[in-house]
Image (tube, rainbow, N blue to C red):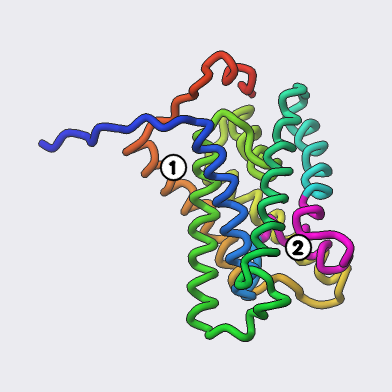
Amino acid sequence: MSSSPKRVFLPSEGIWLFALLLMAFSVCMTVAAGLGVSMIVCPAYLVSEKLSFLTFGQAEYILQGILFIGLCFAVRRFKPVYLSAFLSCLIYGFVLDLFQKFIPLFNVAKTPPESLHIAARIALLIGGMTLTSLAVALFFKAYLYPQVYDFFVKAIVTRYKLREGLTKTIFDLSFLALSFLLSFALFGSLVGIGWGTLAMAVCNGTLIGLFSKLFDRFFIAKPLFPKFAKLFEI
């Protein structure tokens, strides 16, 4: 009978930072593919496309702020430490804009998706979808709060003892419906939504659950500052 693999301790703080950077990078990949962005970021993407004075990252700040208010009502409580989710949001949005500004592939003005071979676009979409799910799974392993989108799911799951993968899937489908409504309201047609969006809506929850199980098999998240970590208990 084979023994279970020895698990490696990883610092929660490092996991959180890596997940933030990975999330920004993966979102840029899906935008560059031009086959439909994630339903979660699609509302912010649509707003930034409609209002040219707003960057993608800045639109994220606005919509995540609205979602944060909804979260406080949903969990029926508010702690000042919850506001740290905005720190994650600010870092994520800032890095997202940097990637799009300085990496030509991620700047659709310089590299339109249509200029890429379809195989490259599909690879970007699959890679972005996979890395997005990995980033979310890693957020759930860190005590520091992720950006508001994922913090919303984490808070609801923790508060009401719900299934992580199922809750995430429901959240994703809700944002998919919102994305359709916004797209037609702002543009009168589908913008930012494609078959890739639908694929992510269906697959993200399952992929997140898979990555979460794989992480638990090989790693253990451990805070470098245990007393500080207690402040983030939901």
Residue at the limit of the structure toward the front, as seen here: 102
Instruction: From the top left corner, tell me how far across and down residue 207 is, in percent.
Output: 47, 53
Query: Which amino acid type is marked by label 1?
Result: Ser
Q: Name the chief secondary structure element in magenta.
A: helix
Please tell me whether mark 1 sits on a helix, a strand or a loop.
helix
In this rendering, would 154 be left or right of 3?
right
Instruction: From the top left corner, tell me how far across and down residue 45 is, in percent.
Output: 76, 62
- Position of residue 171 relative to residue 6, above or below, is below
Q: Which residue is mark 2?
A: 45
User: Which residues, given as a range, are shown in magenta?
Assistant: 39-60
- Position of residue 133 relative to residue 137, above or below, is below
- Quarter holding the N terminus is top left
**Is 1 one of the magenta-colored residues?**
no
Q: Quadrant of residue 33?
A: bottom right
Is there a contact, CB below 8 Å, between mark 2 and mark 1? Answer: no
Mark 2 or mark 1: name the one nearer the start of the chain: 2
Q: Which residue is mark 1?
A: 212
